[in-house]
Every structure is written in structure tokens, then in C-alpha cells.
Amino acid sequence: MPLPRPEPGDWSSPAELAKLQEAELPRVLAQAMRSPFYTSRYAGRAAPAEAADFAGIELTTKQDLRDHYPFGMLAVDREKLATYHESSGTSGEPTASYYTDEDWADLAERYARKWVGITPADTFLVRTPYGLVITAHLAQAAGRLRGATIVPGDARSLTTPLPRMIRVMRDLDVSLTWCNPTEIMMLAATAKAAGLRPEKDFPALRAMFTAAEPLTEVRRRRISEIWGGIPIVEEYGSTETGTIAGQCPQGSLHLWADRAVFEVWDPRTGTLSATGRGQLVVTPLHREAMPLLRYNLADDVEVTDGGCACDWVLPTVRVLGRSGAGYSVGTGTVTQQRLEELVFSLPIEYDVMFWRAMAHPGLLRVEFEAPDAVRERAVKELTRLIDRELGVPHEITGLPLGTLVPTSALTAQRDILKARYLFGEGEDWDKAVMYA
């Protein structure tokens, strides 16, 4: 019999939310002690069993997960597992994660907590990798839970090039998409390369869900503007935890504190607190296969409690990434977040979508693509913004469209083949066995 899980409306104050967490902790601790990792960690000493014991628990790290690959964190019989996943490995070697069917019920419910709801009337394009990471599977499970039609668009796949996705979005009246912010920009650029207007020629599209990259408010507004003003709905999570925060109608990211205990770890002092700036620590409350106690995601965040006009009784989180300190240039410091805000402060008519920067000790180099007619003006405007806001030595270069993101990536329909072994005279038999 599945255990009941909280839903919005089950609490009306921070105190009630804390009681929900405390009531779950004894069960979470007991489940964790069924895994080899936590059993060995507490060998020869008393294991935490009550909510009061939680304050003394040490952090679980990504290295712990790597050291106990593949099943050292497993707390159920392998026969109960539904799926196995690995993280993308952006911060080092990938980590393994696994989920039961009961875990997946929780994962799908949390993802589906979008203020722009998923409905049976929706056609939902999932444009993230269907590989070992959890992202595409998470969206598909949530979409099916709410009755939507799923279009498994994948990403970085030979079988789903960008032009094919644009055709699918138009022909199938796609109403929702799920992809990272850069992919949303790539889709817009592909539509433009095909002679379409992202802001007008996709009338069924009503929202785009996004995650996987820190997203400034300026960039989110620009993406929305490019796509005709539709909501760009952000969420935050990981393969190890699933969705842990969702965006409210006011644009704030709120931690799902009814489904996990969240803390902020200050690596300078080693202290943990409910709010503040530091690295996010997560203890899922409804995890069966792979319980995690005080798992340090190693993401730099800022957590605050209350104060959002949406009236959700949940803490808010601002995700700063894993390099929030930035780079020293001259006598100043440059962060990706601040630079992104400046780039996307340029007027939309400059049509700037793709950029890159290199921080040298004495010079910040920035390059961006812009159409010929506005490139010089865009360079002057970004130069003015960086002078005023950053005050560091810099060199700004405007590039022709197609320089950073090759036009072929936006227009090519790849020649995808199934494995073939027999060829006729004049055919390219170098394609034997291979798929492309």
C-alpha cells in the first residue's frame, strides 16, 4: 500500500510544514539504515532513529555515491527496482541512482506541480536526452500521469535533428515543451532559419518548461519575448533527487519542502542552516530505493524563507551554479550570471541569442552573433553596459550569424540509416554496419 504523500494545501504555515518533515524523518532514517553505505557508516555506533537525531548526521557527498557504485546505496532488493540512472557528470565522475515504482510516483507528482498545468489536451514535446540521466523520463512520467500526449523528441540524437523538431512542433500542434534554456534558443534559431517566426507561427504553444542551466530573470524574459510572450517555467533538480524546486506564478523558485528537508551548508565554517547562501543539502522524505541523508548537491544557492507574493508556504531558492565566485579580470570579478544579464539586456531587435566569453587576468573577451544590419550597434551597446556595470578591461566582438552555432546545425536533416550490409555498385559501402 503506497504511503500518503503531502500535497499543496496540506499545510498553511512554516510550523505545519516543519511538522510534516519531522513526522517522516524516523521512517526515512530506518529506510536509510537498510543500505550498505549507511549500515557501514554507523557500524559500531548508534544509528540515528528519531527526528531529534537528525541534527547530528554528517553529510553524504557525491564522492560517497561514486565510492559505492553501483549498488552500495541500495536499500531494497534489486527485484523491486524500476529504473537505473547515472548523472551527467558535469562536476566529475557520474553518480548512480535508482528508483522503484513507488519512488516514481513521487517523482512524477513533483514534476507535475507546474503553475502552468499539464492536461490531457496537451501535446508535450520532451526535448532532453533519453539516456542514463533522468530528465526525459521524469517529464514523460509526469506527462502521462496528467494524461498528455508525449512526443519523445530526445536531444543530441541523430534521429531528431532540430529541423525535424520544428516540423513536429508545427504539425502536431505541440502545446508544451521540456528542454534546457540553450535548446529553447536553438529551436528559435532553427525556426527562423526555416523562415518561420517563433513568436507567431506556433499558435498552439502555451508554455515551455526548462531546467539544467542557471537561468537569470533577464534571459528568461528574453526567451519568453522571442516565443511570443508565453511562460517559460523553470524547475530545479538532479538525477539523484528528481525535481526539488518549481517556479511559482511570480517567477520565484520554491523548494518542495514537503517532500524533502533542505539545508544550506557553508563550506567555510562547516555549519548548516535552513536559509542563507552556500551549498544545497537535500534529504528526500519519500525515497525507497536509495535513501539519502543530508546529500550535498554541491550547487551554490541562496535560500530565503517566505516573502513571495504567490503566498506559497515554501522557501525560495536562487541557483547560482557551481562557479558563483566568477573570474578575476583586472581589479574586478566577472560571473556568468552577471554577464548573461548584460548580454540579454540588449534590445530584442538586435537578435542576439548566442554568445561566449573568455576571462583573462587582464582582459574580458566577449563574442556574440548578430545580424549584419545591427551588429555594430549591438557591439557599442554591450561595450557601454560592460563599462558601466562591470568596469573591467574588455574586448567585444560581433560575429556573423552561424559563427558560434553553425547554420548546418539549424538546417541539416541528417542521413540516418539502419544497419546495412549489402550495397550495389556505386553506393557508399563505408556506411556498412554504422548507422550514419
Image (tube, helix red, strand yellow):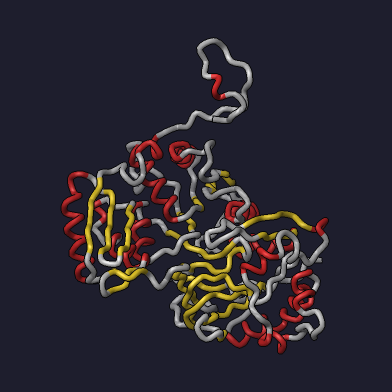
Give the quadrant of the N terminus.
bottom right
- Whole-percent x, y for residue 373 in the image: 17, 45
- Whole-percent x, y for residue 310 in the image: 47, 75
- Is residue 77 or residue 254 the one in the foreground? 77
Which residue is depicted at the point 52% across and 80% down? Answer: 267
The image quadrant of residue 8 is bottom right
Using the rendered image of the protein, determine whether residue 146 is visible from the camera's viewpoint: no
- Whole-percent x, y for residue 70 in the image: 72, 59
Q: Is residue 364 left or right of residue 261?
A: left
Q: Is residue 235 left or right of residue 391?
A: right
Using the rendered image of the protein, determine whether residue 430 is visible from the camera's viewpoint: yes
- Is residue 71 or residue 375 the one in the foreground? 71
Which residue is depicted at the point 25% across and 47% down? Answer: 399
Give the quadrant of the C terminus.
top right
In the image, farthest residue toward the front: 361
With respect to residue 362, does 355 lie above or below? above
In the image, farthest residue toward the top: 425
Q: Is residue 50 left or right of residue 133?
A: right
- Whole-percent x, y for residue 338 in the image: 33, 68
The image quadrant of residue 218 is bottom left
Which residue is depicted at the point 23% across and 63% down? Answer: 394
